[in-house]
Image: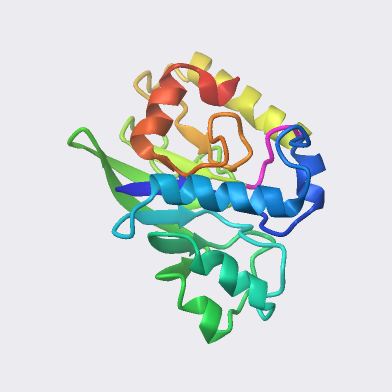
Amino acid sequence: MIYYCADLHAFHSNIIRFNKAENLFSTVEDMNSTIIKNWNQKVNNDDIVFIIGDECWLKPTDERYEHFFAQLKGQKQLIRGNHSPSQFPPNVRKHFCDIKDYKEIVDYVDGVVYHVVLCHYPIICFKNDFKPDWVMIHGHTHYYTDEAIYMREQIKEIKKKYVQYPDNRGQIFNVGICCPWMDYTPKSLKALITMNDKGMILQ
């Protein structure tokens, strides 16, 4: 199984306020523990998890950085974000099977092949965006920010007006872990498509 998430911001105490999650977490330790617990309840060691940037708020030389990712199950692949280090020491690098700035992969939902574009930054006109079997997965735009609200409104317009290619469903998914549909838990592509079809990702 392949899972996706973004913007863990581990050890970033201000992100609790920024994400309006004070009712969920009283400390950054609470947030970190919840992410680890939710992750390991969902992910098995044979699963692949794409972390779409901004994974941690520490310098990679801080021993807590390695300790956090050592606790997470699965084969972790990182798509760098604006707060991701450009270089990792070997003791941290070993916890990621791959590190890229951008990646295109293939995933499957009920036997149907999907092409998935992975980038920390949302791409409103991503590669082959007119095809219903292409999906863009991103982070960066935290749910309550003006830019996240703007992105959701733009995607709604695409879904409503993109009549040239009516099969396209505006499949641009924000997997920032604080988003209501993510619930601080990595999600599969099937779950994301289902929630998108129900309108949850644009709420």
The reply, left or right, for residue 110 in relation to residue 162 is: left
Q: Residue furthest bottom?
A: 90
Residue 131, percent from left and from top: 34, 33
Query: Which x, y percent locates residue 182?
Result: 53, 35
What range of the chain is rendered magenta?
140-145
Which residue shows up at 64% across the image and 65% down it?
Answer: 84
The image shows residue 173 at horizontal and vertical percentages of 50, 36
Front residue of 136 and 15: 15
Give the prevailing secondary structure in the magenta stretch. loop
- Verify whether residue 141 appears in magenta: yes
Image point (82%, 50%), residue name: 14
Q: Is residue 151 above or below residue 15?
A: above
**Left or right relative to 58: residue 121:** left
Residue shown at the point (37%, 18%) measured from the top left:
166
Residue 190 picture location, percent across and down = 34, 33
Q: What residue do we see at 42% from left, 19% from top?
A: 197
Residue 111, by quadrant, is top left
Q: In this orientation, does residue 33 appear?
A: yes
- Nearer the observer, 56 or 157: 56
